[in-house]
Amino acid sequence: MAVQWDLYEMYLALLQAPLYHLIIEGLLMVWVAWLLLRKPKIRKPILTEKEQEELITDWQPEPLVPDTTEDHPALDPFVVEGKVGKYVCVNGRDCLNLATHNYLGLVEDKNMEDSAVECVKKYGVGSCGPRGFYGTVDVHLNLETRLAEFMELEEALIYSYGFSTIASAIPAYAKRGDVIFADEGSNFAVQKGLEASRSDVRFFKHNDMKDLERLLEAQSAKELKNGKNGKPVRKFLVVEGVYMNSGDICPLPEIVELKSKYKVRLFVDESISFGTLGRHGKGITEYYGIPADHIDLIMGSLEYAIPSVGGFCVGTSYVVDHQRLSGLGYCFSASLPPMLAAAAITAIDTMENDPDMFLDLNNVCRKLHIALSSLHQLRLGGHRDAPVKHLRLAKSTGCHNHDGQLLRQIANESMKRGLAVIVASYLDQSERFLPQPSLRLVANRLLTENDLDKAIKILEDSCTAVLS
Amino acid sequence: MAITSTCNCKLAPGQNGKSKHAHCSTESHFTDKQTFQEGYEGIGKPRNRNGIESFEEVPMSVALLTYMGWGIVILIGYVKEFLLSFVPSQNPEKNREGYAPLYSSFESFYTRNVYRPIRDCWNRPICSVPGAELVLKDRVTHDNGWTFSFTNTFTKCLNMGSYNYLGFAECEGPCATAAQKTTHSLGLGVCSPRQELGTMAIHKELETLVARFVGAEDAITFGMGFATNALNLPSLVSKGCLVISDENNHASLILGLRLSGATIRVFKHNNMKSLEAKLREAVVQGQPRTYRPWRKILIVAEGVYSMEGSIVNLPEIIALKKKYKAYLYLDEAHSIGALGPRGRGAVDYFGCDPKDVDILMGTFTKSFGSAGGYIAGSKKLINHLRINSHANCYATAMSPPVAQQIISSMRIIMGEDGTDEGQRRLVQLSRNSRYFRQKLRQLGLIVYGNDDSPVVPVLLFMPAKIAATSRELIKRGVASVSVGFPATRITESRSRFCISASHTKEMLDKAIEAMDEVGDLLRLKYSRLPRPIGPVIYGEDKKPQQDQVD
Ligand SMILES: Cc1ncc(COP(=O)(O)O)c(C=O)c1O
């Protein structure tokens, strides 16, 4: 009723209003409509055909790629002959290998090779199709089941490349408008994943939980201000179990606490920690004794502890299964060659049957840590339990490039003396937070005390040769 | 000659069906001489291998019905969800109360209601080599696609779904043997990126061979084709550069471009007029707002489009790129090995000079039956990539047996194994493709793409036919791939067949017969173009002449 009455009143008012008033109102309305609807005028220079041709002839693009220096180390990499195992033949010289991520020493595992060969006899090498289109071989399904069982989680999913695993998994969930908290010390694959997600990325200081809490607090204050009408914001936290760029272990207990408090989803890159940390090699969660279901997604690699190719994600089916339709590197790439998956299954067998290998590895990690900390001219970074160690110049020259050159010389000297170590390679221009140059050393379960002594001796000698 | 000859396929006026011929541009940029006499030295003779390319347009009534079909699918979904909303549901996640939902609602609606009920048409597990035939591991679902269980029975099917163009997916023979030997001698894993300690002699051998194969100065290889695009494009273009990209480019290219920070503009699929318009506008207008000229312009295209079956119009793109001083990135994932008298991709097919393509990219997952990807080009380009490529610096090196498989199969294609096996496969593939396509056309099916392309998409249109076609074909022992939205345009659901050199004529006939039956059963014979008349004789048309093959 009330509405009708209002309308009637308005009608009466209209009748009473003077005509000029109505006309002015009408004109005003037309003007407003015109203002709203008119297209912004673009000053488009109209050029004649001839002028256009001239522009086309005049335009000189930059060269496709800039000139490169001929003596860049990447143009003349070390060339390895034979297997890249505990010992490796680099540029024709036999060396003890502390450079490649063969933590468990499984490169030399004959069983892995045998199962790969058996697999080729049945399936050939390539899978000739993505998982969706007849590229799913039963070996892939077996490997996924085995990985899920090994990690005691619901479901696993494999990718055909370690780098693409991380870089595809993150943007499968995080999208534009979401917020991601990430560590400044994240590796390059994580950085690319963050970039591809187009989310709002906030970096906290490396392993600094205070800084992380500050950012989380700021975000929840912001959400509170937006009040109830604001859509709930999806928030993610991405960390690494063991950081590739520093050898540090993430403080998972604090992280899990913060994650539950601020309701952010936690993704952990376990590329290094899978198969190295914990009594049974189950990674960072086992190391800290934290139930794995606190973590929303665990991403791992089949290229380090398991020396095959590929990567995987594990977690609940609700989370993991989503990637089967939205993981770009999963959907739009041929699946992992079955032989590499078969070899990975054999590696899991070995890891399950011989859990003492993780004790051995941990022993080597700690011994190597102690041994390396005795070096005078190099400063050790990284956690004692981590299989990756970084050595930086104790006295930095203050120049990034010069430090790098000195370290490279030390590495070359070491190779001459029979120890393979490398300078961690980074793309200086592309890294978000460029780490200081370092020698990255890798612990291998098969290293003996003698080997370690030899390595330290060679490193010392090389340092003396180069630095003094 | 080639370009004009394709224009003879114009339809008689008054014909109802319309046909777009991507290669029929009225404003051709060349005369015949220009295009083909610039052929790449050493081959000498200009070739005419430019097949007819057609994309028959969707009849209006079918398009309407298709939209209605999708409407019904979505509607049923909404009704179902509405009814289900009365049933108290549990949170699918444990211990995640108060978290923002992980998935957007439409996305999960689509997965639940459209994809899940027909999920059995994808990810079918196989337990054999994906050769000319494959063995499916049968599975059943008792809950409408939520879960599957294996029945422990197996079905042997003709394999028309794998990208096994040259038939190198083999579990015996010289390639497999060599891969096994390499596994024992060099191991499987390298555990290090190429720039650190992951470069082996076999990688260098592979790169030299690839460079020789594609006719470039140098090449660089990576462990995954997808990553080759996604991780190298950012080192080639950046902010202030313009990329003009084909609308049907692969996800890996799009990802790489997005990561690069360059401005991206899209041209209509294989449409040279659209490309030229974009190029012209870019050079004339410069960057938006500032009008500053672009730093450089990169055209990105593929050799064979895996969903369209079309072949890139390379000669015209090269002419345009030269005219506008743009650079060209050609992804030969599906064309390398599969096209050209010598199997060297779209460049070889058109007899172009490989030096005219600035960046030759390709993958080893298809024709070579292996894994990984390459980029080939000038020494300067490859040096730049060796230093700056994300994949070369951070991603693990290619596994040795995988590299060995590529080396062995590539040598066979090049005839360096001392047999004519490679040549035999190339001829077989091109005969198979032409025969199969013509036969399907004759049945009245709408077949997209180029006559010479081994990728054969057959249009289904209606969403309900996606699963039906796939299932009916499996019943008849033919494994094919069916796709719909979002992989294709909403009206253009299709079934795709990939031809292989390992298929025999008998196998193709079996598939054609199956498609004939299914076409009648599901009413797929939409084509209104005049059907090719007369018997299609296997291997008769356009045999590569001896002098074209060296
Ligand atoms: C055009 C194109 N580029 C790249 C790729 C990715 O190649 P790969 O399967 O080797 O990762 C594909 C494969 O599906 C493709 O079609």
Image: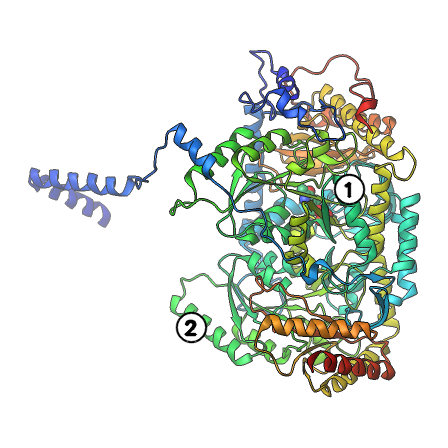
**Which residue is labeled 2 in the image?**
A221
**Which residue is labeled 1 in the image?**
B212
Q: Position of residue B105 (x, y in %)?
A: 54, 53
Quadrant containing the N terminus of chain B is top right
Callout 2: SS: helix
Q: Residue drawn at (69%, 60%), measured in percent from left and top? A: A74
Q: Residue drawn at (64%, 83%), measured in percent from left and top? A: A394
* Quadrant in the rendering for residue A458: bottom right
The kind of residue on which mark 2 rests is: Ala
Q: Is residue B112 above or below residue A77?
A: above
Disc 2 Cβ-to-ligand 1 distance below 8 Å = no
Quadrant containing the C terminus of chain B is top right
In-front residue for pair B324/A198: B324
Q: Is residue B226 above or below residue B469?
A: below
Q: Position of residue B82 (x, y in %)?
A: 54, 49
The kind of residue on which mark 1 rests is: Arg
